[in-house]
Image (tube, rainbow, N blue to C red):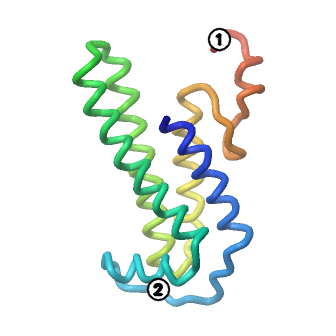
Amino acid sequence: MVLVILTVQGWFGDTTNLFVTTGTTSSIAFSFGAIISQIISYGPILIWHAFEGFILLILSLVAIAFSFLWSKKKSVRILSILGCAFVISAVYGGVSFVVSGFTDAGASAQMGVASSELTGFTGWSFTSQSSSFWEASSRPGLHF
């Protein structure tokens, strides 16, 4: 479920990057209201992208809880914690990018890099930010 939403998140991130014109916005105050206002002012694509990021954050926290409730394997717990860390990194990059007035290219890149690392350590992805499912399935040792 998380990987499917992450895939759609990547598509909307690419769409936002290509089609949402942010202009020359100055940086804003680091407050919840200012961040939400800034996101809303750029329309539905950016609103959806931010909403999906929030949903991914919640789902990654739920995945950690379930990994401790339903699994005794350390690998499941470690991967869920790592996944959450990557989502938190992407959210931090997104918030930093909005607060910078959409001028901090490093924060923008952090969203893509964190999400590609998230999908990369699981072994496959449908997003353009990391290897495709077909490339991953052709690698030796990876079986789905």
Q: Disc 1, disc 2: CB below 8 Å?
A: no
x, y percentage for residue 142? 65, 14
The C terminus lies in quadrant: top right
Q: Residue at x 49, y 79 (%)?
A: 40
SS for tag 1? loop
**Residue placed under numbered mark 1 in the picture:** 143
x, y percentage for residue 129? 67, 46
Quarter assignment of residue 25? bottom right
| Kind of residue at badge 2 | Ser
Quarter assignment of residue 45? bottom right
117 shown above or below 44: above
Q: Residue at x 28, y 28 (%)?
A: 66
x, y percentage for residue 14? 68, 59
Q: Residue at x 39, y 35 (%)?
A: 82
Q: Within 10 Å of the Cα at label 1, are there few (<14), some (14-19), or many (20+) other Cα atoms?
A: few
SS for tag 2? loop
58 shown above or below 143: below
| Kind of residue at badge 1 | His
**Residue placed under numbered mark 2 in the picture:** 27
| Separation of residues labelled 1 and 2 (CA atoms) | 46 Å
